[in-house]
């Protein structure tokens, strides 16, 4: 039982707990805040895996930009909680049953089919540490240059699309 | 040392919680947040594999997934605001105008 494993287990508990909190909160604002904590926990996992660039992107883009946008919309619409009106009474137990089947299937496959005993390298030994951030940039801007540029066009299209959707319709006289 | 299987299992559990959120919640915003959780769990698995395989490709994929998620959220939230304007509710059960 080394330090890394203990750290992993504590973080995994926090991640699963916050995900369940997101799922079960009656108030959408609490759900959003639980999800922020979940994203930050996953960012710490990225640091443990030796991926500092992705961890920082996760915090700035997910926990920063995306969740702030969510909170804006929740508070703008005043849609914190919906009235409890169950239209399909069988839906909830059915969904829970399907989820249990899904996760037990994944666990079964992992336990029975796991052939590799690969361990995640320690953050210091990982190939993708802060010192190698330069190489990540080199790969991103040489091998993956075209997808990178396409991503910028995608973001532009999304921005224009959001503005067009929200814009007030011009009245035709 | 943490075995890679632990990360994959955690990713599977988070994905299942996200899928469960999509199935059982009625609030369109919470369904959307559950989709984000599913994307995030897939990212976690990809970074774990990238770390074990000592390759940058997984991390670069995750970078692109984060960018696509940002674009998706911008458009999706605009759609939710429009739906709220026309129906005064974001309950997904209300969105049945095209029901035969």
Image (cartoon, rainbow, N blue to C red):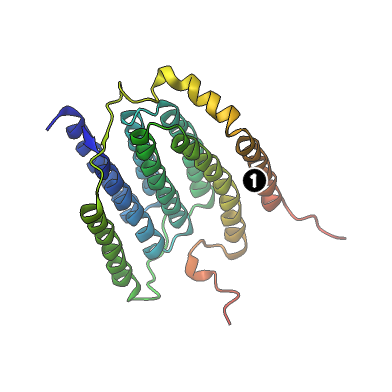
Q: Quadrant of the C terminus of chain A?
A: bottom right
Left-right relation of A173 to A81: right
- Residue A39 lies in what quarter of the image? top left
On the image, numbered disc 1 is attached to which residue?
A: A158
Can the viewer see residue A26?
no
B34 lies above or below A35 = below
Nearer to the camera, B82 or A10: A10
Local crowd at mark 1 within 10 Å, few (<14), some, or many (≥20)? many
Residue appearing at x 62%, y 32% in the figure? A145
Label 1: element kind: helix
Residue appearing at x 28%, y 29% in the figure? A121
Left-right relation of A25 to A79: left
Left-right relation of A22 to B79: left
How many numbered discs sit on the rendered protein? 1
- Residue B24 lies in what quarter of the image? bottom left
Can the viewer see residue A143?
yes
Residue appearing at x 59%, y 74% in the figure? B97
Residue appearing at x 62%, y 63% in the figure? B86
Q: Quick one: which residue is furthest to the bottom in this view?
A: B100
Nearer to the camera, B32 or A98: A98
B76 lies above or below B95 = above
Q: Quick one: which residue is furthest to the left in this view?
A: A1
Q: Quadrant of the N terminus of chain A?
A: top left
Nearer to the camera, B98 or B61: B61
Residue A129, percent from left and from top: 38, 22
A63 lies above or below B89 = above
- Residue B16 lies in what quarter of the image? bottom left
Residue B52, percent from left and from top: 33, 35
Q: Chain of mark 1?
A: A
Left-right relation of A78 to A39: right
């Amino acid at each position: 039982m080394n330090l890394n494993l203990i750290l992993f287990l504590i973080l995994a508990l926090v991640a699963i707990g916050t995900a369940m909190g997101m799922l079960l909160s009656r108030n959408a604002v609490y759900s959003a805040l639980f999800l922020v904590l979940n994203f930050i926990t996953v960012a710490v996992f990225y640091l443990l895996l030796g991926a500092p660039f992705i961890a920082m992107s996760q915090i700035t883009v997910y926990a920063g930009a995306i969740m702030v946008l969510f909170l804006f919309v929740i508070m703008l619409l005043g849609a914190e909680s919906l009235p409890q009106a169950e239209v399909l009474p069988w839906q909830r137990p059915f969904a829970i049953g399907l989820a249990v089947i899904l996760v037990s299937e994944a666990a079964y496959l992992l336990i029975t089919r796991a052939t590799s005993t690969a361990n995640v390298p320690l953050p210091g030994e990982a190939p993708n540490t802060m010192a190698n951030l330069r190489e990540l940039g080199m790969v991103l801007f040489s091998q993956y240059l075209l997808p990178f540029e396409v991503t910028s066009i995608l973001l532009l299209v999304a921005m224009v699309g959001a503005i067009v959707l929200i814009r007030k319709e011009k009245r035709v006289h | 040392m943490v075995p890679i299987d632990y990360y994959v299992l955690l990713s599977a559990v988070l994905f299942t919680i996200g899928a469960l959120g999509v199935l059982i919640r009625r609030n369109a915003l919470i369904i959307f947040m559950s989709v984000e959780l599913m994307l995030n769990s897939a990212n976690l698995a990809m970074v774990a594999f990238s770390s074990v395989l000592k390759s940058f490709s997984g991390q670069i994929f995750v970078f692109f997934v984060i960018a696509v998620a940002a674009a998706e959220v911008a458009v999706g939230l605009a759609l939710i605001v429009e739906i709220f304007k026309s129906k005064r509710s974001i309950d997904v059960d209300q969105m049945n105008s095209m029901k035969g």
